[in-house]
Amino acid sequence: MRLLRNISLAILLMAAGSQTLKAQNIKEPKGYLFGFVASFNDSTVYFTDIQEMDSIWVTKKKKMIAGKSSYSYQLRNYFAQERNLPNRTVVIVGSLDRKKIEKKYAKMKNQYIYKNKGKYDVRYIPQSDFKFNMVNLEE
């Protein structure tokens, strides 16, 4: 009887633990994003400007930017349609703190400009050419 109770308790705990909890997102009044675009076929890499978003969704627990895939699709589509450069690898970096994102931006730029000097052709996309649109994650 005791063994049956322990087994049923273990099954109950495993079933409860295996249910995926839906991550809750919250809306913050301000956030910052920049994009990085590269291709394995050539040595040209692109950086967008750091863009301030009026409102941005973040994960409730870790305050990470939510919906990064939607932002990366925006940038990927811009390259495919406007610049006729499809199949690019896109990385979106975001933060709620301006100083943190500036530090990440400088670190990535230094990696491609100074550490690998002459290996990459680094180009910039001004905000006048491409601007991220807010992604609405309301449920």
Image: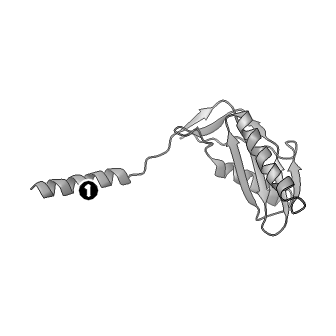
Judged from this view, the residue extending furthest toward the bottom is: 41
* Residue 105 against residue 38 in the figure, above or below: above
Judged from this view, the residue extending furthest toward the left is: 1
Is 94 on the left or on the right of 11, as rendered? Answer: right
Q: Residue at x 87, y 44 (%)?
A: 126
Residue in front for this viewpoint, 138 or 92: 92
Residue 28 can be seen in this image = yes
Q: How is the image coloured?
A: one colour
Label 1: which residue?
Answer: 11
* Residue 61 against residue 9 in the figure, above or below: above
Residue in front for this viewpoint, 80 or 43: 43
Q: Residue at x 82, y 50 (%)?
A: 110
Q: Residue 119: which quarter of the image?
A: bottom right
Q: Residue at x 81, y 70 (%)?
A: 41
Residue in front for this viewpoint, 115 or 70: 115
* Residue 22 against residue 2 in the figure, above or below: above
Residue 132 can be seen in this image = no
Residue in front for this viewpoint, 104 or 95: 104
Image coordinates for residue 13, horizontal then vertical, percent: 29, 51
Q: Residue at x 82, y 43 (%)?
A: 49
